[in-house]
Amino acid sequence: MNNKQLAEKGISKNVVILGLVVLLALMVGIYLFAKINTAVSTEPVSANGKVAKLSDGCSSGGTCSITLENNTTIITSCAVTLSDPKCKNYDQTKLSIGSQIESTVVKASAGDYYNLDCDICTIQVK
């Protein structure tokens, strides 16, 4: 459409440009939001707190994990309360609900999910 056709329909050129700018800003915002919320890091970070929940679901095809009171979840590669020789990252005999832990973990996925997939990753019960 040319300017005359737009004017006949009551649409100014400035309104069209403003609409395109708003649409572009919305698309950039959605892209950045998705990128931030799906970031996965390989850099070790600290995840500390009091244990709120323990899951041994991996022994039956699910996920084994430790959830802290702040909703941070550490996904483990082995059962969290059973004696499992695969658990090189922490002493399971000391771990229980209410335990205060300090851990070195890596970001696993969007949200508050972490794992023990690094050489220095560990969980220490305090």
Image (spheres, rainbow, N blue to C red):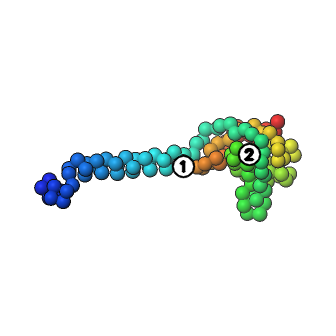
Question: Which sits in the foreground, 122 or 53?
Answer: 53
Mark 2 residue element: strand
- From this viewpoint, which residue is outermost toward the bottom? 60
Q: Measuring from the top left, give residue 13's x and y in whole percent.
A: 20, 50
Q: Please name the amino acid that badge 1 sits on.
A: Thr
Q: Quadrant of the N terminus?
A: bottom left
Q: Considering only order in the chain, which callout, 1 or 2, is on the residue closer to the N terminus? A: 1
Q: Measuring from the top left, give residue 109's x and y in whole percent.
A: 60, 49
Q: Is residue 48 above or below residue 113?
A: above
Q: Measuring from the top left, give residue 28's x and y in whole percent.
A: 40, 47
Query: How far is disc 2 from disc 1 in space, using C-alphas?
Result: 21 Å
**Where is residue 6, by image quadrant?**
bottom left
Q: Residue at x 62, y 44 (%)?
A: 107
In the rendered image, which residue does mark 1 sit on? 38
In the rendered image, which residue does mark 2 sit on? 68
Q: Is residue 86 visible?
A: no
- From this viewpoint, which residue is outermost toward the front? 10
Q: Quadrant of the C terminus?
A: top right
Left-right relation of 33 to 93: left
